[in-house]
Image (cartoon, rainbow, N blue to C red):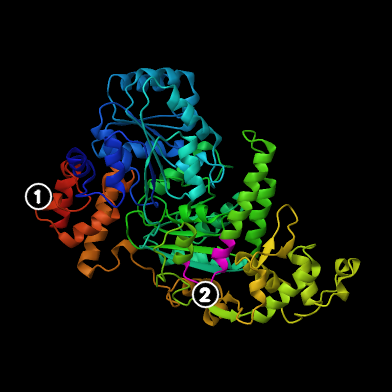
Amino acid sequence: MDAARAALKEHFGYDGFRPGQETLVGAVLTGRDCLGVMPTGAGKSICYQIPGVVLPGLTLVVSPLVSLMGDQVRALLDAGVRGSYLNSTLTPGQQGTVMRRALTGAYDIMYVAPERLADSRFIEFASQANIPLIAIDEAHCVSQWGQDFRPAYLGIGEFIDALPKRPIVAALTATATEKVREDIVSLLGLRNPATVVTGFDRPNLHFAVEQLPSKRKLARIVAYALNHPQDSGIVYCSTRKDVEKVHETLVESGVQAVRYHAGLSVQERTDSQRAFVLDDASIMVATNAFGMGIDKSNVRYVIHHNMPGSLEAYYQEAGRAGRDGESSECLLLWNDGDIGTCRFFIEQEVENEALAPEERELVRASQRRLLAAMTGYCLTTRCLRGHILDYFGDESATECGNCSNCEGRYQALDVTLQARAVMRCVQELRGRFGKSVVADVLHGSKSQRIFEFGLESSRTYGTLPDDSAARIKEIIEILASEGYLQIGEGRYPLVGLGVRAREAAVPEFSLAMKRPPERITRLKGAEGASAAFGAAGSDAPKKAKAAEGLDPMDAELFERLRALRKRIATEATVPPYVVFSDAALRAMCLARPKDEAQFLDVQGVGQKKLERYGEEFLREINA
């Protein structure tokens, strides 16, 4: 491990490994397969990059997103690691040159997409190359139970088995339930893998959930962006239409925003990504087509304009904030319409020809269960962080004091009586109807369908005349998320009693639903949006979040170092984080090194970066 630690300091500037990294690196270096499940920002890439430097031969990294490979390789080259990639952005001639050079030992690490492993030309190349390690990034993509299933991942195991000499195999992912982990081991053919599942907690992330009408969501997002002009953020939307709407509104408000979705041309998507990664645009508005494995460490906030379809997807997307360990925000805006949109996507999803019909239905059933868990997160009144950690089986879950629920940014409304009425109505209707009909019966609706089915004569008809149908449907969702009710499958899901239905009949049963604090409810437009983010109505733009907590002199130096980093990055046409991360700049401000030896002691500064940038940064620090 001495060689691994020396490489870690020389190339990446770190004095030691983070939790989980040393175990995985050690396993690989002793020839053992491994599975690493580590949250975004925990440094999964180090687990194959360090072995890639230390082991003789070419380490192959299977990565799902072609658009990121260029930046990943540029970051390696800047750290003094001989990196390369093979993907469709290269011409056939360029691809041939890369493979010929790889066979001469010109590279330590090569990134490829999973589809590349089925290419006959690449298979011939791989059979001749010395490949000691194959690292599979975003390994959850192999599982049909994961949120990002990709059929091409199913061919990885076969590719590995066909190689003349089987390499070590390292599978890495940020979010994987027990079922997904079992699939990864089985489908990739891992042999007695060393398994590391680090805690899923990201203490530097602040979580918040707010239920808002669609029209209010835009005001929240615009106000936050205007209030944090120095920070980089991602806004996720569930549809291309919403991406266009949010992007247009931000640009009209004077925000430097770009957009990314599958309806744009390849060039448009590439230009947007480059502008965001290079810090030429402060906000990326995107569908979930953007971001898996994105190598940008200084994202300070992730806002979801819509609720995703699973907690796995949400935690992975939200986890793109604060990868450098600095304090960052994760806000989820949602309403009942988002649940309907997710259900529509599940039922209308394009048929996957790689799966048999019965397997496709199993996938849909799994997606419905994932959606129920996501809905539960939005509705819960307990600690949001604890809710997430419980879901992933992390036993460290406690009240965090660093989420909107723990901070009391909602009012708990007792709806026990309404919940009991809902349970009685569902029992009386015997699971024959969906949410809308149940709500209409309880509210006492005089709609045609109520009379068509003779439901006006139900004992529970009109039991809740003062509660809107929307509120009743929300109570149904809460009861379902807690297991008291069960919402069925298919295009018209029926509501029946759940496994915990009997518990709702005991005297101790109670239920609460979240409501925004009275102040936020009263405020309109941008002022309300600012208050929702803890701005207390203040309209003054804030300094960069990474500079928070620094004294005025250090904060001023931080901004000067950011400007220097941006100039160097622009001249080299690389993303600013490739030069130094925000965390490294912050450490420089606190340490104020006087010479090269002290500069090398700063966390995040290695020998290669000292040689490249030390003189200019030392001059600025000591100006």
Q: Residues within 10 Å of mark 1 (few under 14, many from 20)?
A: few
The stretch drawn in magenta includes residue 46:
no
Residue 187 to residue 525: above or below: above
Give the residue type at disc 1. Ala
Q: Is residue 55 visible?
A: yes
Placement of the N terminus among the 4 image quadrants: top left
According to the picture, the residue beneath numbered tag 1 turns out to be 597
For residue 251, the mark is none
Residue 263 horizontal/vertical position (percent): 59, 42
Q: Is residue 376 located in the magenta-colored stretch of the structure?
A: yes
Instruction: Give the residue drawn at x 44%, y 69%.
Output: 403
Q: Is residue 76 visible?
A: no
Q: Is residue 429 above or below residue 136?
A: below
What segment carries the magenta color?
374-384
Looking at the picture, how far across and down is residue 588, in whole percent? Answer: 19, 57
* Left or right placement of residue 240 versus residue 57 in this view: right
The residue tagged 2 is 528
Q: How many marks?
A: 2
Identify the secondary structure beneath mark 1. helix
Question: Which image quarter is the C terminus in?
Answer: bottom left
Q: CA distance from mark 1 to mark 2?
A: 50 Å
Disc on the earlier residue, 1 or 2: 2
Coordinates of residue 544 in the picture (x, y in percent): 33, 63
Nearer the observer, 458 or 53 = 458
Q: Is residue 258 above or below residue 99?
A: below
Residue 73 rendering spot, x and y as whole percentages:
34, 36
- Where on the picture, by quarter, is residue 113? top left
Question: Which residue type carries mark 2?
Answer: Gly
Residue at x 24%, y 51% (from the top left corner): 564
